[in-house]
Image: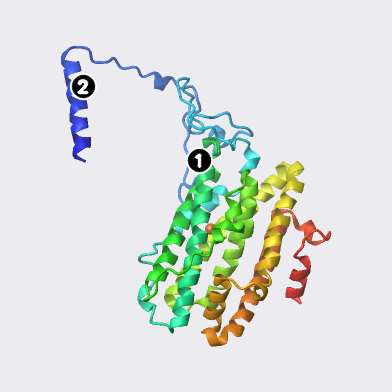
Amino acid sequence: MAVIVAVWREEKHDEMSEAANGTEPQLDLGWMDRTGPWDTRAEPGKYGLTIADISIGEYGEAPEVSDNLTGRPRGAAARPASYRIGAYAVRSKNEIWLDNASFLYEEALQRQWSSATDVPWHTIEPLPDDVEQAECQLATFLTEVEFVAGDVPARWVSLTTPDFYEPRQVLLAQVMDESRHMDVFRKRALANGGGLMQATGATAGFVGSIDLSRDFTEMSSRLHISGEGAVLTLFRMGELMAQNEAEKVIYRLCAQDEARHVAFGVMHLRYMSETAPERREEIHCYLDEAEGGLIGAANPVGQLTPTSESMAIILGGGKEHFDDGMNKIIAIRRRQLQEYRKRVVSAGFGERFENGRSRVAQLIEEAAA
Ligand SMILES: [Fe+2]
Ligand SMILES: [Fe+2]
């Protein structure tokens, strides 16, 4: 702080000496000559002044292809001397666009919560050792997964032209949400006499592949539809796993955030499908890959991992009720498959469940029976 004040004083001194020497710069006011749209009066609507409300006239029009490499806010006049600050990879609208971005963003703003004060931490009471160890193992896994969910969208924000500011805002809000998810599960691990357990390596498997995506839609189908879709179902069934009110609240609030992230992916795929039908086959390939992961996950008994073991102990209520817990995991996996199907249908790719392409269609039928 002292350094900043010193620099400011120096600047002020130079300015005053300049004025005293009669070399004070003349007003330029060139910026007042701007010829863009003026007299814009956005009116607040039912939900206040939202970004949908300011999406009016020329300010509401995102270009199909953006040539903005300088960080210029959409609708502002260009400045010829601007540096090219961003070699943005995402400059075609259909690569990232969705129709309800402003709604998702405003909802994210209105529904922010505090992991410090909105969770009734005092309701956590001592648990049997095996259940506490399992809670801490699951919390370790979720902290790992949430790390990826925050890290990857953050990178894509920096790769997207500022002309597509609406989806960027939603992704920035997601980064804040994931930051909170990361800390809330870390807090849970440290709140009841346990601690962080074994890293599961989740970031090296399917979750890790999210970060290897070289295209935004490829990334979004892996992250929003497949990965976060599965996590959303898990959080929605958090009631089954929660040992106390604090954990119930954590799962409920996280599910609320995840629902927005998943909605982003569904709405983006829908937009892409409608505006770039030539990419539909490519997107089906991403879904083929996602279903490969779901098939593995659908049979947790066959491949026990620290995550499935800890979940079974939590759901069963202890090591001695492991099999009961496993049955509950199978119920969760079934629901994950059903919700996955619903999202893919909603995104406009439902034909894969009718034409034999989907590798999980049969499992979904069986789960519904
Ligand atoms: Fe999350
Ligand atoms: Fe998320």
Name the spot of residue 145 as percent of width and height, x first: 52, 60
Please indicate, yes or no, whether residue 170 appears anywhere in the rendered image.
no
**Which residue type carries mark 2?**
Glu
Q: Is residue 24 left or right of residue 169?
A: left
* Furthest residue in direction bottom, as rendered: 320
Name the spot of residue 76 as percent of width and height, x first: 48, 29
Q: Is residue 207 left or right of residue 365?
A: left
Q: Is residue 161 above or below residue 266?
A: above
Res. 24 image quadrant:
top left
* Depth order, front residue of 316/283: 316
Query: Residue visible at 67% across and 46% down?
Result: 271
Q: Is residue 88 above or below residue 248?
A: above
Q: Nearer the viewer, mark 1 or mark 2?
A: 1
Look at the image and tell me in which quarter the N terminus lies: top left
Please indicate, yes or no, whether residue 246 appears anywhere in the rendered image.
yes
Describe the element under mark 2 as helix, strand or loop.
helix
Describe the element under mark 1 as helix, strand or loop.
helix
Query: Mark 1: is the Cβ under 8 angstroms from ligand 2?
Result: no
Mark on residue 200? none
Colour scheme employed for the rendering of this structure: rainbow
Label 2 crowd (10 A; few <14 / some 14-19 / many >=20)? some
Name the spot of residue 265 as percent of width and height, x first: 62, 53
Mark on residue 158? 1
Name the spot of residue 61 as percent of width and height, x first: 58, 35
* Furthest residue in direction top, as rendered: 22
Residue labelled with disc 2: 15
Look at the image and tell me in which quarter the C terminus lies: bottom right
Query: Residue visible at 42% across and 74% down?
Result: 246
Query: Residue visible at 49% across and 22% down?
Result: 35
Query: Residue visible at 43% across and 59% down?
Result: 180
Label 1 crowd (10 A; few <14 / some 14-19 / many >=20)? some
**Which residue type carries mark 1?**
Ser
